[in-house]
Amino acid sequence: MTPDVRDRAGRPHRANSRTGTAVPEAAWDRAVRLIGQAEEIALACHVTPDGDALGSMLAVGFALRSMGKRVVASFGDHHFVVPRLLRFLPGQEMLVPPEDYPAAPSLMMTFDASTFERLGLLRDNTARAREVIVLDHHPSNEGFGTLSLIDSTAAATAMLAEQLIYRLGGRLDRDIATCLYAGLVTDTGSFRHSSTTPAVHQMAGRLVATGLRTDEIARELWDRSPFGYLKVLAAALDRAVLESGLVWTYVTRVDRAAQGLPYAELEGIIDIVRRTDEAEVAVVLKEDDHGHWQVSTRSKGKADVGAVCAALGGGGHHNAAGYTSYDSVEKTMAAFRRELGKV
Ligand code: 5GP
Ligand code: MN
């Protein structure tokens, strides 16, 4: 007999949420049926969206719109702004701030959100939704909705979004391809991470064939920033510490304020810090506008930072993960070292 599994909101959890497996056919079929029956579909991705979260959501939004569905899309940040580096993505007219989001959607879909908490201000809306389809690729996602389209072998949620679009009878156009490509290229680190399988390159081929300017997308995503970023980066690198296989640094609100730099501009710092040859694990503590530390962690493969961050209240992948710390820099690092020592 099937145990009576319930999600966090107390709804019976009907769908297959096994991780580490491809999405079962029955789950795809049910998603297509639910979407077919819906008039309005409310989309949500995780807070402070990255290219995969926002790109997957907007791509599916385009496909749903072309089926004649009403679409609203959002993410649950207190300060609702699309990160500057994602403003080139088409489809932003679908976005509404959390306060304008349907209070109790009949059909909701979430993108790249590994936990219920990652929905931020949209948690209550999600808890009240009749059906919640969860599209994700995080191994830690146990399925907080009523239907899981979760495949932890997928390099990006964008790969699941592409599948869904085909199964809905949609096809790729340049807008959809731009959004999906942003997701694919973000989560594979420009096709550098070990998650970059033949299927990833095959998907990239399909996307690029729509006429994408991959050079322009790459520049929007990684190769531009305001001048103040250089100064903040310099401060962060100046403070970097190397200690037995671990390299870490931090960026304060004061650093950013001195340069008028928004929090979202800090995303790339970890990619510079993690190149340190002497370190297996890299950590960057980024103080957000509320004074909390958003902790970005990366591993070169030996240590499972996903497990470390999960133990500290966050989550993510084996080699890239994060969490929020409400402690001081010193206490945050002490707790991190302690957990790292256990994996
Ligand atoms: P980043 O360091 O780029 O912000 O995050 C790396 C990865 O860690 C993300 O793709 C996401 O999967 C995960 N992650 C980051 N912050 C959090 C968090 O607060 N909670 C959870 N569950 N995962 C996080
Ligand atoms: Mn992702």
Image: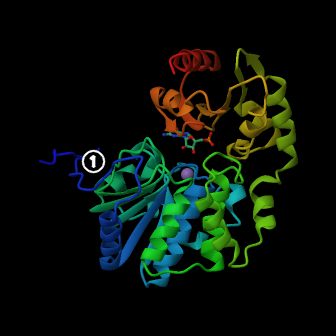
Q: Is residue 238 left or right of residue 176?
A: right
Image-based side of 169 in relation to 176, left or right: left
Whether residue 113 is visible here, answered yes or no, is yes
Name the amino acid, label 1.
Answer: Ala
Pick whichever, 34 or 210, lies toward us: 210
Q: Quadrant of ligand 1?
A: top right
Kindly identify the residue that appears in the image at 58 percent across and 52 percent down: 49
Residue 239: horizontal and vertical position, in percent? 80, 22
Mark 1 surroundings: few (<14), some (14-19) or many (≥20) residues within 10 A = some
Q: Mark 1: is the Cβ under 8 angstroms from ligand 1?
A: no
Residue 63, placed above or below residue 290: below
Q: Residue at x 63, y 45 (%)?
A: 194
Q: Which residue is mark 1?
A: 9
- Tag 1 secondary structure: loop
Picture coordinates of residue 207, whole percent (x, y): 65, 72
Residue 221: x, y in percent?
Answer: 74, 56
Snapshot quadrant of residue 263: top right
Task: From this view, report whether residue 76 is shown above or below residue 300.
Answer: below
